[in-house]
Image (cartoon, rainbow, N blue to C red):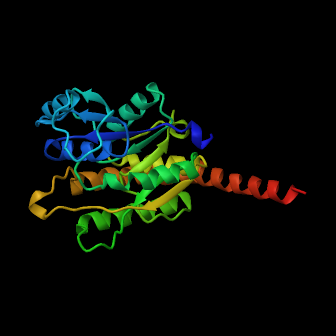
Amino acid sequence: MKSSDVRICAVVPTYQNAGTLSDVLGRISAQLTDIIVVDDGSTDATREVLDAMEKGALWPERTGRTGTRLHVVRHSRNRGKGHALKSGFRKAAEEGFTHVITIDSDGQHFPEDIPLFLDAVRQHPQAIIIGSRNIRSENMPGKNTFANKFSNFWFMVQTCRRLEDTQTGFRAYPLHRISGTALMTSRYEAELELLVFSAWNGTQIVPVPIRVYYPPEGERITHFRPFADFARISILNTFLCAGAVVYGLPSIGLRKFFASLRKSTRP
């Protein structure tokens, strides 16, 4: 794929983030002209916010929203971030986009970092680009740091690949590399599953450093449930480790073997 063939949009899954949504979308619109928002069954004022933005209201004045196209996909009930992402990917493909940049709607990510992803996509159009947070940051909540280290360890076991941040939701995906991927999970751990499957299938994964904002404790909106979520992740990792033994690691090994063989036979 040539860089000139690349068409990129943003995919923003959202659930109960009416308070931050308009600001996040406004800042994204200063970077990209097409935004797909997937409302995953929100019961707060998200629908009203999106309705107003579709009509041209509520956009922050400082943004470059002229010409922005807002596409809204709605789930009738909360189905999980994994489902929301798949709905966004499907909509992006229907609209003719080749790549999507996913970004959370809670205000933790900086849309101003989107140019880093645009540059990386142009350099590596076949790769998944993942934002890499500084997990040693003083303001990162302890449970986030632990969860990320836990996830990074199992990713390394399952793929023989080390990444600093496997849980970030700020990513760029080439749609043709992930289309048809059958995920076992439907919530936020689907992002880890997608990374593992992509590594097994030979997709390059390129990290780029990003900033992140964690609001004060009393202002944070989180859907993370420590016991239930760690239980689901542990079950997922059990299946992924089994898959790594019978498919993933042999596939990676064979791919490296044939690559070295081709290299050695070149004149």
Residue 19: give x, y in percent of width and height.
13, 45
Expressed as whole percent of the image width and height from the top left, the position of residue 233 reads 35, 53
In this rendered view, identify the residue nearer to me: 109 or 180. 109
Quarter of the image holding residue 217? bottom left
Does residue 142 show up? yes
Q: Is residue 84 above or below residue 103?
A: above
Quarter of the image for the C terminus: give it: bottom right
Q: Is residue 186 visible?
A: no
Residue 118, percent across and down? 47, 49
- In the drawing, does residue 182 fall left or right of residue 22? right
Query: If the image is split into quadrants, where does the N terminus sit?
Result: top right
Question: In this rendering, is residue 40 above or below 256?
Answer: above
Q: Judge by depth and name the residue closer to the eye, 46 or 257.
A: 46
Q: Is residue 262 left or right of residue 243?
A: right
Quadrant in the rendering for residue 266: bottom right
Residue 35 vertical position relative to residue 113 in the rendered view, above or below? above
Q: Residue at x 47, y 36 (%)?
A: 182
Which residue is most to the left? 218
Which residue: 57% across, 36% down? 5
Q: How many marks?
A: 0
Residue 153 placement (x, y as % from top left): 44, 65
